[in-house]
Image: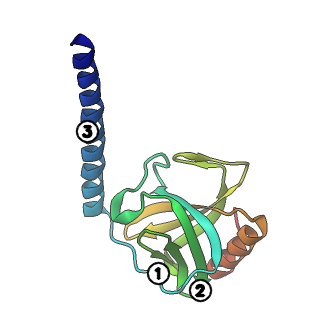
Amino acid sequence: MIRETIGFLMLSLVAVIALTIWLSVRKRRAAQEKLIAPPLAATTQGDLETFYVSTVFEAAPLDRIWAHGFAMRGRAALSVGSDGVSVHRTGERSFLIPAKAITGIDAATATIDKGVERGGLSMIHWSLGDTKVASHFRFTNPDVRKEFENKVSQLIGAQVG
C-alpha cells in the first residue's frame, strides 16, 4: 500500500509540475500579446527551405517570444521580395518580416535552445511594432543560406554581419 501511495504522489507531482508550466507559458503569452503587435501575414509562397528556430527579444536574447505563435520551431519556407521576407511555417502561423522593419542580418551560433557550428544560423534583426526582435533560421544547405542572406542584404542595402 505504501508503494502505491508513493507512486500516486509522484505521478500527481508530475501532473502538478506540467500544469504549472502550461499555466506559466499561457500567462507569459497573454502578457506578451498585450505588448507586442501581431505580425503581418506572409505575402508570397516560400521557395527557400529552412528551419525556423526562434524569435527573441533583441535586448534579451534568452527570452523567447511566445506571443502570436512565434514560440514553436519547425520547418519553414522563406521568400524574399520587395515587401520583405515571407516566412511560411509548416503547421504554424506564417508571417511577414516587412522590408522597412529589417534593421540587419547576421550570422549566429546559438539561440534559446539551439546551438550549431560557428555562424550556422541566419539571424534577421527587425522591428515588430515598437519591439526590436531577432528571428533565427537554420539552413541545411550553405549555398541556400548564402543566397538568402544575399537577397536580404540587397533588400535592405547592407552587408551580412
- Label 1, label 3: how many angstroms apart (C-alpha)? 34 Å
Q: Residue 133: image x %, image y %?
A: 47, 61
Decide: few, some or many residues near mark 3? Use Cα within 10 Å; few <14, some 14-19, many ≥20. Answer: few
Q: Is residue 154 left or right of residue 87?
A: right
Decide: few, some or many residues near mark 2? Use Cα within 10 Å; few <14, some 14-19, many ≥20. Answer: some
From the viewer's perspective, is the residue at label 2 or at label 3 nearer? 3
Q: Which residue is mark 2?
A: 81
Please identify the quarter of the rendering in which residue 158 is found.
Answer: bottom right
Vertical comparison of 10 with 135: above or below: above
Q: Is residue 52 left or right of residue 20?
A: right
Say what amino acid the circle numbered 2 marks: Gly
Q: Residue at x 73, y 71 (%)?
A: 144
Q: Which residue is mark 3?
A: 20
Q: Residue at x 25, y 57 (%)?
A: 30
Decide: few, some or many residues near mark 1? Use Cα within 10 Å; few <14, some 14-19, many ≥20. Answer: many
N-terminal-most mark, 1 or 2: 1
Q: Residue 86: image x %, image y %?
A: 53, 78
Q: Residue at x 59, y 86 (%)?
A: 81
N-terminal-most mark, 2 or 3: 3
Q: Residue at x 65, y 76 (%)?
A: 48
Say what amino acid the circle numbered 3 marks: Thr
Q: Which residue is mark 1?
A: 42
Say what amino acid the circle numbered 1 marks: Ala
